[in-house]
Image: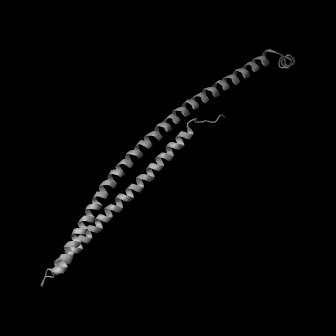
Amino acid sequence: MAKFVFKLAALLRQRKREEQECQRLLAEQAAVVNAAEEAVRRINETVHAGEEDVRRHLRGRLDMGFLTAHRRFMIATQRQAADLVQKVVVAKKLLEEARVKLSEAAKRRKAIEKLREKQFERWSADQARRETALSDEIGSQLAYHNMLEDQLPQNQLEEAFE
């Protein structure tokens, strides 16, 4: 039996590789977003811990050196948090772009797969028609042979096929 050959198989493999590459980039970008968000959470925890330290030091006698150092620490932490928030925004934008690219790559791959399916269906239908025609031809030849057997004696039949 004949084998189906898809002439655009190399293109389909290329589209699948492109889609896998987009999936890899999406995963990398998602990891960047998660890491940046985790860093923001850690800074928030640090800020809350610093606030608790200040509350403990506000009882009794005030230590101005501690309060000044704490204020500088809080300003630096706020700057760091602002930078991280900007990184999160940029990373989320890049993540969305990666999602769009992945979606487009999947569409391109699916288009080629759909074309392959249609060509396979046409090929299968053509194969079925050929097999039916071949079966009909064999059936016709057998019927003709049987008709000859019925009409001619054995010796004339052998001469007819020689």
Q: Which is more toward the observer, 72 or 3?
A: 72
Q: Position of residue 99 (x, y in %)?
A: 38, 48
Residue drawn at point x = 34 percent, y = 55 percent: 91
Q: Residue furthest top?
A: 151
Q: Position of residue 101 (x, y in %)?
A: 40, 45
The quadrant of the image that shows the C terminus is top right
Q: Is residue 21 above or below residue 48?
A: above
The quadrant of the image that shows the N terminus is top right
Indicate the quadrant where residue 139 lies. top right
Q: Is residue 144 left or right of residue 103?
A: right
Q: Is residue 35 above or below residue 126?
A: below
Q: Is residue 41 left or right of residue 7?
A: left
Q: Position of residue 38 (x, y in %)?
A: 32, 64
Q: Is residue 142 above or below residue 62?
A: above
Q: Which is more toward the observer, 124 or 47?
A: 47
Q: Which is more toward the observer, 155 or 112?
A: 112
Q: Which is more toward the observer, 82 or 92?
A: 82
Q: Is residue 35 left or right of residue 123?
A: left
